[in-house]
Image (cartoon, grey):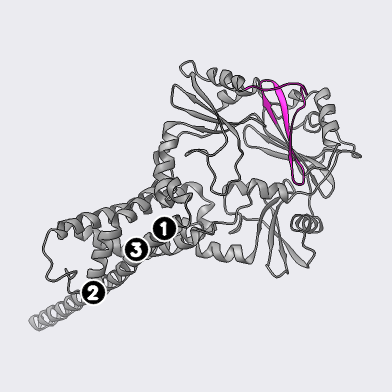
Amino acid sequence: MKKLITIHHYLGTLFFMLFLVWFLSGFVMMYKSFPFLDKKGKIQSKELTSLTSKKIVPPSSIFELDSIETIHKLRINAILNNIVYHIETGSGKLVSRYAKNGELVKLTKKKALAIAQNATNLKSTAQVTIIKEVDQWIPRPKYIKHLPVYKVKFNNQEHTWVHISSLTGEVLNITTYNDRFWAWLGAIPHWIYFKDIRIHSYFWQQLILWLAGLGLLMTLTGIVTGLIRYKKKPKANFKRFKNKWYNLHYYFGLGFGLFICTWVFSGFMSMTPFNWVPSSSLNAKEKKVWQGQNFNLKSITSKNWDTLKKIASKSNFKEIHFSLFNNNIFIEKFNKDTVENHCITNSNYKVSNNQYASKINEFHPQEKVTKLLVLDAYDSYYYDRKNIKTLPVVKIITNQDTYYYINPKTNRVLLKSAPKNRAERWLYHGLHSLDFSFLTKNRPLWDIVLIFLLIGGTVTCITATGLGIKFIKRKTKKHLKKNKLKRKKNITYTKRRTITIK
């Protein structure tokens, strides 16, 4: 019992401020996250363009000297009214070239400002700087390949900042003063998302795991000692300790300790420790089976290209995405307010749900499709609290208890959910943000429950802060007293020795 109390005291003193910051930032995280530019935002930031009057060369000719074996992603959009091809290879290499002559994208400060103005529809004055290191608003390693980055700061009322890649000429992020203010109060302290830490992914992950692991030990020892003490009769009602801080911490810890424990545990699980959760995307072998072949530049024939140009010339668009399924090439054309889907290999080609099932049966000899559904509403694993994810989707279940969610318009596998992925969904999202449908679909019930629990956790941490400060003062005082006695003994010993020598 004494050892558990000692462990809890020392860990509590070490982590009281961190836990208090986590809970306080949790209130902000309920409504404001880190200002990422999502897929929809990135497409909306593009300018409208057309292939009607533009002379462009097919990608097979443009990238013939780039040694591209397989294509992971191929996109077409415009930068300052110039059509650009963007290829991401299977190995993660990103190459962007102008479609008219094959030159690599090159920016100047003037061009960067024009791109930022097009993306934001702002015409106010701005300062353009070139940054050679990632900053707080593009803090992840994936942004390193985009360096140097053009940072455009508008002098508008919202103090809008735009980060633009020198590699692709595309917008990486758009933030306002409001976004940045709430990020400093919410996501940055909550995720320990400081640029100098986050840029080192492995270190950042290990830091979160160790902090959450030790925090979990602190919480568990607190719960155990609290339950043991609960058996003893209090001196008076709700007065187990003379010290008010101890008393408050004890009862709030006892009442909210379980929720604090689940939050710390789910935070630990968010880092997928020991790589126990498999990927939610198709692996290389499965992707090749799904596509029918490796997707490369030769996959798009001159006939396919002519078909694409006819479709793309009918109306203005923001971006075109390519994909491959069963040896047929499909495009997803993002217009100003609508999205079109076409097969450029064969305009009459229609994909059936049975074809999806047949492809999945080819993934592994032991894996066979047992059930096929068409979902018109989200389920517990394919869902979106903002209601922006694609519906309807085809859901296929196999005898290995793996779920595949497929977009029938683009023929892409949106999510692969194995049993471990579904377990992680509950252990992380379920426990950490109370992401249970009976709460999230009945707001403001979710808000009320979460705010109540966060208040309980915050008060527990505030009382822990008081106790931690007192603990530090007590230990410091004891240490100083001990050192003072030591010095006195040393002085006495020196005097006696001097007298003896005389």
Q: Quadrant of residue 78?
A: top right
Q: In the rendered view, does 296 fall on the left or right side of 31?
A: right
Q: Secondary structure at mark 1?
A: helix
Q: Quadrant of residue 342?
A: top right
Residue 71 lies, in percent from the top left, at 68, 30
Residue 240 lies, in percent from the top left, at 16, 68
> Which quadrant is the N terminus positioned in?
bottom left
Viewer-proximal residue, 344 or 409?
A: 409
What residue span does the magenta drawing correspond to? 323-352
Q: Secondary structure at mark 3?
A: helix
Q: Which residue is mark 2?
A: 244
> Which quadrant is the C terminus positioned in?
bottom left
State which tag comes first along the sequence, 1 or 2. 2
- The amino acid pointed to by label 2 is Lys
Viewer-proximal residue, 208 or 396?
A: 396
Q: Which residue is mark 3?
A: 456
Residue at the image point whose x is 33% and y is 54% from the top: 259
Q: Which residue is mark 1?
A: 450
Residue at the image point whose x is 54% and y is 52% from the top: 199
State which tag comes first along the sequence, 1 or 3. 1
Q: Are marks 3 and 2 in contact (CB under 8 Å)?
A: no
State which tag comes first along the sequence, 3 or 2. 2
Viewer-proximal residue, 378 or 178?
A: 378
Q: Looking at the picture, does residue 498 appear above or below residue 240?
A: below
- The amino acid pointed to by label 3 is Gly
Q: Looking at the picture, does residue 478 appear above or below residue 332?
A: below
Separation of marks 3 and 2 at Cα, in angstroms: 17 Å
